[in-house]
Amino acid sequence: MSVKLSANVWIGALLVMFAILTFLPFYYVMLASVSDSNLIREGELMLWPKGFNLKAYGLIFDNAQFLHSFAVTVTRTVLGLAVNLLLQLTIAYALSRTYLPGRKMFMIYIIITMMFNGGIVPTFLIVKGTGLIDTIWALVIPSAISTWNVILLRTFFENVPSSLEESAKMDGANDIAIFIKIFLPLSLPAIMTIGLFVAVHHWNAFMDAVIYTNSADLKVLQLFLRDMVIKMEMAALMGDMSAMSEVSSLSIRTASIFLASLPILAVYPFIQRFFVKGMMVGAVKG
């Protein structure tokens, strides 16, 4: 009994240590964003802010483009989440049905696309040829289907007892009704987990916005923050004495990282209970 208790204490201590190690970098970034950058370079920053100021945040929020870019990123994330889940869930459900004609052929085709990627140039030519350049859909459609997510969802659907589907069909339900009323409610943990992955992807995406958009109206938050850091560094190099030069690029960078991460961190606690169950998706093979 005492040996088991001692083992639990050690395991608990290790988990607490890992939790602190995981939280510490983000906490340091938050501290650095509100501290004097000169004191940070001198190694004065430990557990509390040094030379507390909010100039970096003020500089970011005073820029009118910030709110516009934030709205563009929210729009992209919501649209991307809706389109991705709609396509991936329907494809995964169809592939999970053993009576689907050509099921194995479709799976082989999907796995091939996961192993062999066309590359940036062919993808850009396709997006350009379909007229999506400089539209919000250029940020949503090219990454609408993740092969890995489809395989995970298909595995989850396959583990739902087939007797439920048979009973529903005996009551007169068709495939669409069975999918919406039976499979989607039972798959909520998997959907929330995949949804979180998709939302994080769209929120943090950067390169596709660089490649597919030129308009300032479609500048996402990540592009805005990048431009902000570049302007700071250029102002410092040119010896600019404006308000922008009074804030170091380090403060802008850390404030940008904190602001970009904050919305996802705010959403996570609300879906954490689904996330724990959803992480088991694909863990059981059969």
Image (spheres, grey):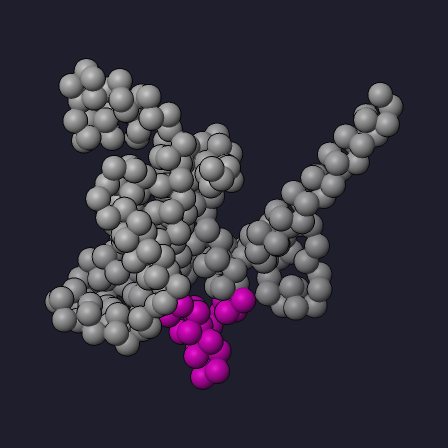
- Left or right position of 117 against 130: right
Residue 285 is at least partly visible in this image = yes
Residue 153 in the image: state x and y as whole percent. 37, 41
Where residue 63 appears, as percent x and y from the top left, is 33, 60
Q: Is residue 9 left or right of residue 59?
A: right
Lateral position of residue 52 relative to residue 279, left or right: right
Q: Is residue 187 above or below residue 171?
A: below
User: Is residue 117 magenta-colored?
Assistant: no
In the figure, residue 129 lies in which quadrant?
bottom left
Q: Position of residue 247 (x, y in %)?
A: 50, 67
**Where does the magenta region start and end?**
223-250
Task: Identify the image quadrant of the N terminus.
Answer: top right
Does the segment drawn in magenta span residue 246? yes
Q: Residue at x 75, y 36 (%)?
A: 11
Compared to 278, does 252 lie above or below? below
Q: Identify which residue is drawn at 23% across, 57% down.
A: 141
Q: Quadrant of residue 174?
A: top left
Picture layout, residue 103 above or below residue 252: above
Q: Quadrant of residue 61?
A: bottom left
Foreground residue, 154 or 197? 154
Q: Position of residue 254 (x, y in %)?
A: 52, 60
- Res. 188 in view: no
